[in-house]
Image (cartoon, helix red, strand yellow):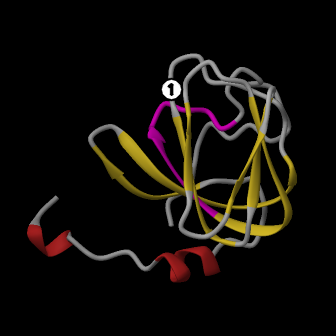
Amino acid sequence: MGKSEIEKVTLSEKFSLINDHWNPRVAGELNGQQVKLAKFLGPFEWHHHANEDEFFMVMKGQIEIHLRDKVVTLRPGEFLIVPRGVEHRPVANEEAEVLMFEPASTINTGNLENSDRTRTRLSKI
């Protein structure tokens, strides 16, 4: 990437382009990692990632990350890292805007690769 291609990203503008839920988009890439944006609404499936940690940061709204032994509530400006191998389920009782940071190889449904919500090819915004 040349210097002329370096541009800032305005998260509110990127989130305004997303009109669906649980369908991550790539907003940036660095060192084999992706900055992913998605809107969450309702419960997601229980799943885990065998090889990747997952970073969830709430930008707008509120989500819960359900773990088998507790529930962690995230509000704007808060984040949680779910270690690899830990089963979890994100839940948003109202629409939330969430930034995720993870290896480009991470599949959003982890071990549930045949789920209706599995996204293996993410579009860029």
On whether residue 101 falls in the magenta region, the answer is: yes
Looking at the image, residue 68 lies above or below residue 94: above
Q: Is residue 40 above or below residue 77?
A: above
Helix, strand or loop at mark 1: loop
Image-quadrant location for residue 83 = top right
Local crowd size for mark 1, using a 10 Å CA cut-off: few (<14), some (14–19), many (≥20): some
Q: Position of residue 71 (x, y in %)?
A: 79, 42
Q: Position of residue 76 (x, y in %)?
A: 61, 70
User: Between 10 and 119, which is closer to the camera in this rendering?
Assistant: 10
Amino acid type assigned to the residue bearing label 1 in the image: Glu
- Left of 12 or right of it: where is 108? right
Q: Residue furthest front?
A: 70
Does 37 appear in magenta? no
> In which quarter of the view is residue 21 placed?
bottom right
Q: Which residues are magenta?
A: 98-108
Vertical position of residue 30 compared to residue 52: above or below = below
Q: How many marks?
A: 1
The image position of residue 77, as x and y in percent, is 53, 68
> Residue at point 80% right, 41% down?
117
Q: Is residue 19 left or right of residue 16?
A: right
Quadrant in which the N terminus is drawn? bottom left
Q: Residue at x 43, y 80 (%)?
A: 10
Residue at the spot x=61%, y=33% of the render? 107
The picture quadrant where one finds residue 121 is top right
Q: In this rendered view, identify the residue nearer to me: 3 or 82.
A: 82
> Circle 1 sits on which residue?
52
Residue at the left extreme? 3
Q: Residue at x 47, y 40 (%)?
A: 102
Q: Is residue 2 left or right of residue 46?
A: left
Q: Nearer the viewer, residue 5 or 53?
A: 53
